[in-house]
Amino acid sequence: MANASLQRLAASQITLEIMALLSILNYPDKRLHKVAKPVPEVNDRIRRLVADMAETMYAAPGVGLAATQVDVHERVIVIDVSETHDELLAFINPEIVWSSDERKLSEEGCLSVPGIYDNVERAEKVRVRALNEKGETFELDCEGLLAVCIQHEMDHLMGHVFVEYLSPLKQTRIKSKMKKLAHAM
Ligand code: K1U
Ligand code: ZN
């Protein structure tokens, strides 16, 4: 193959690798209820997953994404709650090691339940331990939107969607709205 064609092929492959947008599962998809498995090793496959999840989250747009939502059932979360969208946090094998007794009601949304926002009560502050993209352990004290978001994403890894905190009547209405939306598309 000519050198110019090879360069174009290489460039297009690089672009594809950088820009992989993943499909987000929509509630009430059963796959959202799978329990994610721990990541055995932080390697290039996991770093690629983090990069693709970040692209997908920023494009949605959203402030968080759990691997479960893109049908990957491994314990990986990305979050960026900064106003400038340039403070990406990746949490691999995250654990909540401390939660405050104080609880707070906050409005939540979910990229897997588009158009639905409702109040959920959660711990006001949490401390999370996780691995970063280099496989190093770190701990982070979270409050405000970051605390809400990390708890919401940890629920996803356990197969839970925030609407499960709402009344049975609301859940039924949301399910039927989402099914209608899916059929209309
Ligand atoms: O898990 C998800 O589906 C992502 C979700 C995270 C979240 C947000 C708010 C409270 C709890 C959890 C979202 O990102 S929903 C979309 C959203 O909040 C948003 C969208 C655009 C700009 C800013 C926020
Ligand atoms: Zn969500």
Image (spheres, rainbow, N blue to C red):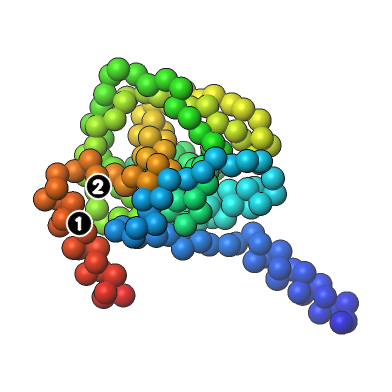
Image point 32% across, 24% down: which residue? 124
Residue occupied by mark 2? 163
Residue occupied by mark 1? 174
Quadrant in the rendering for residue 13: bottom right
Task: Of the two numbered discs 1 and 2 on the same chain, state the one appearing first in sequence.
Answer: 2
Q: Residue extending furthest top? A: 101
Visible in this render: residue 62?
A: no
* Ligand 2 under 8 Å from disc 1 Cβ: no
Image point 46% across, 22% down: which residue? 97
> Where does residue 153 sit, x and y in percent of width and height?
41, 41
Please tell me which residue lies in front, 145 or 90: 90
> Where does residue 62 sit, x and y in percent of width and height?
41, 50
> Where does residue 38 sit, x and y in percent of width and height?
54, 40
* Ligand 2 under 8 Å from disc 2 Cβ: no
Disc 1 + disc 2, Cβ < 8 Å: yes
Quadrant in the rendering for residue 157: top left
Q: Which amino acid does label 2 sit on?
A: Val
